Amino acid sequence: MLMRTDPFRELDRLTQQFLGATGTWSRPAPMPLDAYRTGNEYVICFDLPGVDPQAIDIDVERNMLTVKAERRPRHEGEDVKWEMVERPLGVFSRQIMLSDTLDPEGISADYDAGVLTLKIPVAEKAKPRKIAISHSGDRKQIRA
């Protein structure tokens, strides 16, 4: 139901982890996610600790879901002297292709404890359903 669009995302993540690179608007860093189905909806959870909810942007165009976020330094100024910086700063982005069996109009989003959770309902046309069989009782033969 969900498809990754960038096969090199994990390689980018490892490179950024070892080199300490941060994301920019032209080259955003990846964000980790979990995705699962429960009942009649898909749930996608993005790890975005320390990101202001106002700095998160969610778009759906056709069947492409795009999530962008920006983590900025919390303390800036001339009197701040950083001793260690391990948490990545900058822009993070993730794109996921949604299948036709999902309803992008019904997406809901919640941000709690640094986790952005998107819930995407399964489209009505993709839900299992029973087909009723009609019958007229007596069989009649039609003669031409």
Image: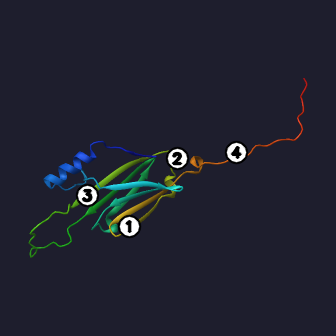
Residue to which mark 2 is pinned: 101
Which badge, 4 or 3, comes first in the chain's sequence? 3
On-image quarter of the C terminus: top right
In primary-sequence order, the first of circles 2 and 3 is: 3
Tags 2 and 3 in contact by the CB under 8 Å rule?
no
C-alpha separation, residue under disc 2 versus residue under disc 1: 25 Å
Q: CA distance from mark 4 to mark 1?
A: 40 Å
Left or right of 15 on screen, residue 81? left
Determine the residue positioned at 17% across, 73% down.
75
Between the C-alphas of marks 3 and 1, the distance is: 17 Å
Q: Residue at x 54, y 55 (%)?
A: 40
User: Where is residue 38 shown, x and y percent of the image?
Assistant: 49, 57
The residue carrying mark 4 is 131
For the residues carrying marks 4 and 2, which lies nearer the camera in this image? 4
For the residues labelled 4 and 2, the Cα–Cα distance comes to 19 Å
Residue 81, how many percent across, how many down? Answer: 8, 72
Q: Is residue 89 above or below residue 135?
A: below
Q: Position of residue 104 (x, y in %)?
A: 49, 53
Residue 24, given in percent of the width and then of the height, sits at 22, 54
Q: Secondary structure at mark 2?
A: loop
Of mark 3 and mark 1, the one earlier in the sequence is 3
Residues at marks 4 and 2 touching, judged by CB atoms closer than 8 Å? no
Residue with the most extreme bottom position: 79
- Corner quadrant of residue 133: top right
Q: Give the CA separation, mark 2 to mark 3.
A: 30 Å
Q: Which residue is mark 1?
A: 111
* Residue designated by label 3: 91
Between the C-alphas of marks 4 and 3, the distance is 49 Å
